[in-house]
Amino acid sequence: MTTNNPPIAAWAPSTALHKLESRHNNAPCILTDTPAEFNDVPLVRLSDYEALKAAHEEELFQVRQDRDAHFGELMRALEQVDALKAECEKLRNLLRHAQPIIRAHAEASHMLEGFRPRRNQWDELVEGVDAALQEAKL
């Protein structure tokens, strides 16, 4: 079955269904290929219905298997993300502790240059550390 609805085998008048439900009248009812009245009821073959139901159950089973497989992958990915976040936080804390030492080293390197200080590698390192810690606050 490629659709969600099994093919309609015949149409029955709604009054016939009431007779069948009440079980008081076993008179035969006339089935037609097309609806004769606005309130006629479509009938489907039991085999078509069962085939559709089996296909639906198979698809549902497959979807659940896929969901379970992907759920496991998702949980592993989330665990990796949590581990990476913890490692990043640890590195940020180390960088916060090292920041004053890096800044002092950069200032000391300028003292050695005398009255004509110029930018050096330590200045770039200080700016990089400051920028990284500023981004971490956001």
Image: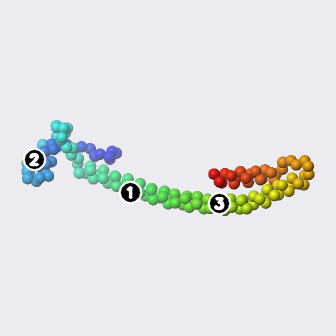
Viewer-side residue, 4 vs 75 = 75
Q: Position of residue 68 (x, y in %)?
A: 45, 59
Residue at mark 1: 61
Q: Position of residue 136 (x, y in %)?
A: 66, 54
Which mark, by number, is residue 80?
Answer: none
Image position of 56 (left or right of 45): right
What residue is rendered at 77% in x and 53% in y? 126
Give amino acid for label 3: Glu
Q: Indicate the secondary structure of the residue bearing disc 2.
A: loop
Identify the colour scheme used.
rainbow
Q: CA distance from mark 1 to mark 3?
A: 42 Å
Image position of 47 (left or right of 57): left
The first of marks 2 and 3 along the sequence is 2
Q: CA distance from mark 2 to mark 3?
A: 79 Å
Choose mark 1 or mark 3, whichever is in front. 3
The first of marks 1 and 2 along the sequence is 2
Image position of 11 (left or right of 110): left
Residue at mark 3: 89
Number of numbered labels in the structure image: 3
Give amino acid for label 1: Phe
Which mark, by number, is residue 28?
Answer: 2
The first of marks 1 and 3 along the sequence is 1
Residue 112 in view (yes/no)? yes
Above-or-below relation of 98 to 2: below
Viewer-side residue, 122 vs 58 = 122
Q: Indicate the secondary structure of the residue bearing disc 3.
A: helix
What residue is rendered at 77% in x and 59% in y? 100
Viewer-side residue, 75 vs 26 = 75
Q: Indicate the secondary structure of the residue bearing disc 1.
A: helix
Residue 31 in view (yes/no)? no
Q: Position of residue 87 (x, y in %)?
A: 64, 61
What residue is rendered at 21% in x and 44% in y? 42
